[in-house]
Amino acid sequence: MKTTKPNKTDFHPSINVSVMEELYEGDMDHIRDMFEIFIETIPEEFDKLLSLYKDQSWEEFGRQAHKMKPTFEMVGRPDIKELFLKLELHKFDTFDPAKIDAIVNDLPGLVHEAIEISRSELQRLNA
Amino acid sequence: MIKCIILEDELMAQKNLARHCDKHPDVELIGIYDSAEKAINFLKENEVDLVFLDVELPDVDGIEFLETSPVIPEVIFTTAKKEYAFDAFEYEAVDFLKKPISYGKFEKAIDKYKKKVNSSTALTTGSAGAKGEFEDMFVKVNGKLVRIILDDIYFIENVGDYVKIVTDNGSFITHNTIKSVSAKLEQTHFLKVHRSYIVNLNKIVDIEDGTLLIKDKVIPISRSNRPQLMEKLNLL
């Protein structure tokens, strides 16, 4: 297996390098695979989340947020993972639709950004 | 081929493992489940060698799954947290993999599975009786070698990749095949009467048409095995 040490400075500034180091220990082939899976998986799953939000199916919405949550950490975005955690845990807090709305409003931009960054990282790693 | 299922609710972890399974020449992925209930239903109906089991599932967690599933193949624990390593040890899992799982770690875990299965020579010859037959045998059950007296056995039944040994003292499930158990018991008073059953000839209550009765269990006799059975019986 071709394995090279990632160059920290090569990652996009939004990507948390320490998380990537901790998760992959320098296995660039694995990082490449995970970016690829992320790009393939997230758009459809995010659409499902938005649709559950629109339908106010809160139980399923929480489950979908739980399913999606760790994927962001896998591509070095623990910041987005934290937002999904808040969505997942909403049922345990005093339910406040305004808080959910605020997070969900910001998400499309952030998720789109994470996908685009992953795409460019994948291109860079494949070059 | 090692028949595997993935029990995992996280999307990327599912896909990552599925890719590794596709890539490995000895592994066949036959199911992906995101809940323990669905996986248990599948296990009841299908032969599975190995489960990649996420410890943190939303409905029933991985540990509860192991405690409630009636059929438990070998297990490789997958988790994002190292704290569960102790559980993996306690439940004699093949391996414990921290997510995200690289292909290298996956390959090593499969090698561990192969070693574990090959080393669990489930049936070990016990002591010999006056006629040269074994009087007992040792069976690997939940990591322990348990002595079973041959005369206590009623019958042995195929259960997927396992065999269930039904005795006076309860049933024992061990990873083995009817074929190899049958070969092991060739010189004894046991006979394979059907592709899924080996019976203790001394425990047969009656034989009627294509079946025989042992204890309270009706066991089918296959046409091909019937002549050998009749030959071995002490008929008046």
Image (cartoon, coloured by chain):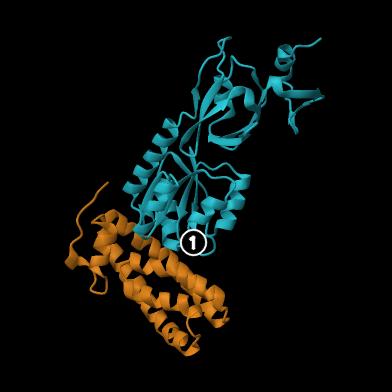
- In the drawing, does residue B23 fall left or right of residue B51? left
- In the drawing, does residue A55 fall left or right of residue A72? right
Figure chain in orange: A
Q: Position of residue A18 (x, y in %)?
A: 23, 66
Element on which disc 1 rests: loop
Q: Which residue is mark 1?
A: B57
In the rendered image, the quadrant that contains the C terminus of chain A is bottom left
- Quadrant in the picture for residue A43: bottom left
Figure chain in cyan: B
Q: Position of residue B115 (x, y in %)?
A: 39, 35
- Quadrant in the picture for residue B24: top left
Q: Position of residue A121 (x, y in %)?
A: 28, 66
Please determine whether, in this image, residue B98 is positioned above or below residue B183. Answer: below
Please determine whether, in this image, residue A8 is positioned above or below residue B192. Answer: below
Residue B130 shows in the view: yes
- Quadrant in the picture for residue B110: top left
Q: Position of residue A39 (x, y in %)?
A: 39, 66
For this rendering, which residue is in front, B64 or B58?
A: B64
- In the drawing, does residue A16 fall left or right of residue B216? left
- In the drawing, does residue B164 fall left or right of residue B83? right
The chain ID associated with circle 1 is: B
Q: Residue at x 52, y 51 (%)?
A: B66
Q: Residue at x 59, y 38 (%)?
A: B160
Please determine whether, in this image, residue B6 is positioned above or below residue A81. Answer: above
Graded by Cα atoms within 10 Å as few (under 14), some (14 to 19) or many (20 or more), the crowding at tag 1 reads: many
Q: Residue at x 37, y 47 (%)?
A: B106
Q: Residue at x 51, y 65 (%)?
A: B58
